[in-house]
Image (tube, rainbow, N blue to C red):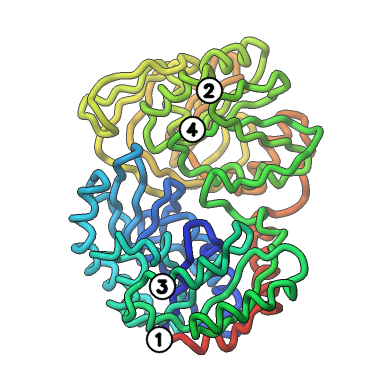
Amino acid sequence: MTALMIQGTGSNVGKSMLVAGLCRAARKRGLSVAPFKPQNMSNNAAVTVDGGEIGRAQALQAMASGLEPHTDMNPVLLKPETDVGSQVVVQGKRMTTVKAREYAKLKPSLMAPVLDSFSRLKANHDLVLVEGAGSPAEVNLRAGDIANMGFARAADCPVVLVGDIDRGGVIAQVIGTQAVIDEADAALVRGFLINRFRGDPSLFDDGYALIEKQTGWRGFGVVPWFGEAWRLPAEDALDIATPNRPNGLHIVCLKLSRIANFDDLDPLAQEPGVRLTMLHAGQPLPADTDVVIIPGSKSTRGDLQFLKQQGWDEDVRAHVRRDGHVLGICGGFQMLGRVVDDPEGIEGPAGATPGLGLLQVDTLMFDDKRLTTVEAVHMPSGQSFQGYEIHIGRSDGPDRARPFARVAEQNEGAISADGRVSGSYLHGMFRDDGFRRAWLAGFDVSPGNASYTATVEATLDALADHLEEHLDINALLACAR
């Protein structure tokens, strides 16, 4: 019933992966360990065993801990819908949608559910490993903070600070953090570690000693770059690893501005017979594309406009005319239809947006989110698989008579009359080894033999071993209280 918090000197310094590795290391020591992140901002969510949603990184950390994902592991999830507004999910359920300034007023009221979830985890496990968000050095956000030092103070949770040497300036990152945070906050910091070192770590010995001398904090080690990190599910679409393969089935995924639940792509990226490309804004669809994937989106109508602004609508239509294939998943499925109608303004201003018209279906938005895991059968191949739904809206029309799958004896998704365009609300399908192999076989691709889940498990073991080699984990875990 102890806890330790890992905070970073900035965003994307590797906190999520470090917590996952530490969870696996603690589990190997025979401890019952659980991950916890008070507040996360991500559109890549996981459906939990208790019927809610949490950030995908906490689902990976749960896997590292040998646990099923639970809403208590990430009680506040912010899902950006615009540049200035986010949906607020509290203990797995949508609470409201607010703009940034409004959230600052709402935030103090969220400490109670955060501490409530944290207390339940502490009561049920030997150790809770807490991940911060952003950086405690953002002292302009300290008032009402629930993500970093505000939580640590309220929960009396000791802190270890992580600096990222790969981005440069790590000495200033750590020393500067101590310089700007409140003395009472700094008193909770038990030490620091340096992440993502490339080359000979001994070259940083003098810098490491300087940080210890200037801060009075002890160092727990320097972690070299972990080369297998690309095999772990990415929380940010920018972090999706796409191995540089010259050949293979060329799958191109449109990187939408509000891309969501793109964990469908990680298993495909690891297939030796697949060449995966993430297409960024301003880039045309490559001429040698075999399959276009239109992924999920937190704002379907907004991303439909974004897609059209890039000229991708014409690119995709031309691709289909050249006998190419398209798969739309969740929001991508909705975009493939004739219209997305949002009369109540669930995603923004009320109205309707014409879709790509590649599937004869129409989508109606309504404020009733579906969150569930499913057992399905892929109709073209007859292959059963597991997936999950996390969406609002309902799609119907003539092409639904040719379903993508069957779920609980009901038709799911749609396929065009020529069979080249498919849409489904089901996420996570490619994590199912049997489905992935059957789907790839439909394109005459010989899939690899590796199990995706087994690969992730082996990578988590390798990550834990990597941390054991380079960190004083016994001393680090001894800081927990």
Between the residue at mark 1 and the residue at mark 3, the CA separation in whole angstroms equals 32 Å
Residue 415 numbered tag: 2
Decide: few, some or many residues near mark 1? Use Cα within 10 Å; few <14, some 14-19, many ≥20. some
Which is more foreground, mark 2 or mark 4? 4
Between the residue at mark 3 and the residue at mark 4, the CA separation in whole angstroms equals 39 Å
The image shows residue 419 at horizontal and vertical percentages of 60, 19
Instruction: Say which residue label 3 marks.
Output: 179
**Sequence-wise, which precedes: disc 2 or disc 3?**
3
Between the residue at mark 2 and the residue at mark 3, the CA separation in whole angstroms equals 59 Å
**Sequence-wise, which precedes: disc 3 or disc 4?**
3
Q: Is residue 27 visible?
A: no
Which is more foreground, mark 2 or mark 3? 3
Judged left or right of residue 227, residue 264 is: left
Count the marks. 4
**Sequence-wise, which precedes: disc 4 or disc 1?**
1
Q: Identify the image quadrant of the N terminus.
A: bottom left
Q: Quadrant of residue 480?
A: bottom left
Residue 1 numbered tag: 1
Between the residue at mark 2 and the residue at mark 4, the CA separation in whole angstroms equals 22 Å
Instruction: Say which residue label 4 marks.
Output: 256
Residue found at x 46% / y 36%: 296
Q: Identify the image quadrant of the C terminus.
A: bottom left
